């Protein structure tokens, strides 16, 4: 029998200002843990405007770039590294669609999202992006 080595993967997650402001970070972490993801690093930071522009540089040409950077730097956030099998995909499934109005029942954005801007959580969109986004916020010795 050929056995598959389901290697663990890591992804970067941000609990956005609307999540911290409403004290729902614990409820969101429970959803991640129920989905088979472990929190292996976590800290609260207040992202500066300049850091926001660098973090979201891929969206620089989008009409919502300014609003996005204003919002993510508007208050403290929780940045975290989630680990598990297929962590990128599992995290995206748990979050639901970017627009809370289009998110599936039971997802974090459906349950907690306010708008497409205040959509409660960010998660890396691919394995490569995850590595870059984790390195943006965490040094190796900060990850369990
Ligand atoms: P996030 O996963 O953090 O990645 C980029 C963010 O841009 C996304 O979540 C949304 O919050 C935001 N975004 C995407 N589309 C729009 C839009 N049309 N208007 C405002 N913000 C948007």
Image (cartoon, helix red, strand yellow):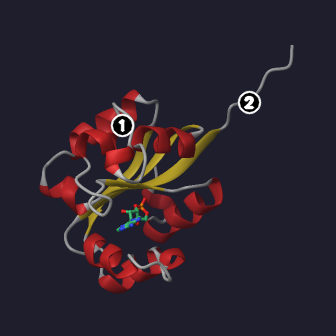
Residue 133 x/y as whole percent: 51, 65
**Left or right placement of residue 134 versus residue 113 in this view:** right
Indicate yes or no: mark 1 CB to ligand 1 under 8 Å: no
The image quadrant where one finds the N terminus is top right
Q: Are marks 1 and 2 in contact (CB under 8 Å)?
A: no
Real-space CA distance between mark 1 and mark 2, rounded to the nearest whole angstrom = 28 Å
Instruction: State the residue at coordinates (41%, 43%).
Output: 96
- Name the residue at the bottom extreme: 50
Residue 91 x/y as whole percent: 47, 43
Q: Which marked residue is nearer to the observer: mark 1 or mark 2? A: 1
Name the quarter showing ligand 1. bottom left
Q: Secondary structure at mark 2?
A: loop
- Name the residue at the top extreme: 1
Would you identify the image quadrant in which residue 4 lies?
A: top right
Instruction: State the residue at coordinates (48%, 66%).
Output: 139
Q: Nearer the viewer, residue 100 or 143?
A: 100
Would you identify the image quadrant in which residue 31 lies?
A: top left
Instruction: State the residue at coordinates (40%, 44%).
Output: 95
Q: Which residue is mark 1?
A: 107
Would you identify the image quadrant in which residue 75 lies?
A: bottom left
Q: Secondary structure at mark 1?
A: loop
Q: Which label is found at residue 63?
A: none
Q: Which residue is mark 2?
A: 5
Residue 68 x/y as whole percent: 34, 73
- Name the residue at the right extreme: 1
Disc on the earlier residue, 1 or 2: 2
Q: Nearer the viewer, residue 75 or 38?
A: 75
Q: Nearer the viewer, residue 4 or 54?
A: 54
């Amino acid at each position: 029998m050929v056995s598959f080595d389901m290697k663990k993967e890591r992804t970067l997650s941000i609990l956005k200002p609307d999540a911290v402001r409403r004290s729902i970070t614990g409820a969101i972490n429970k959803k991640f843990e129920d989905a088979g993801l472990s929190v292996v690093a976590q800290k609260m930071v207040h992202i500066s405007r300049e850091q926001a522009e660098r973090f979201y540089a891929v969206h620089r040409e989008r009409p919502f770039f300014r609003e996005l950077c204003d919002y993510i730097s508007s208050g403290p956030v929780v940045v975290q590294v989630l680990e598990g099998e297929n962590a990128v995909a599992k995290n995206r499934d748990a979050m639901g669609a970017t627009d809370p109005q289009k998110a599936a029942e039971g997802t974090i954005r459906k349950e907690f999202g306010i708008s497409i801007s205040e959509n409660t959580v960010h998660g890396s969109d691919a394995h490569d992006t995850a590595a870059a986004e984790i390195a943006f916020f965490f040094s190796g010795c900060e990850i369990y």
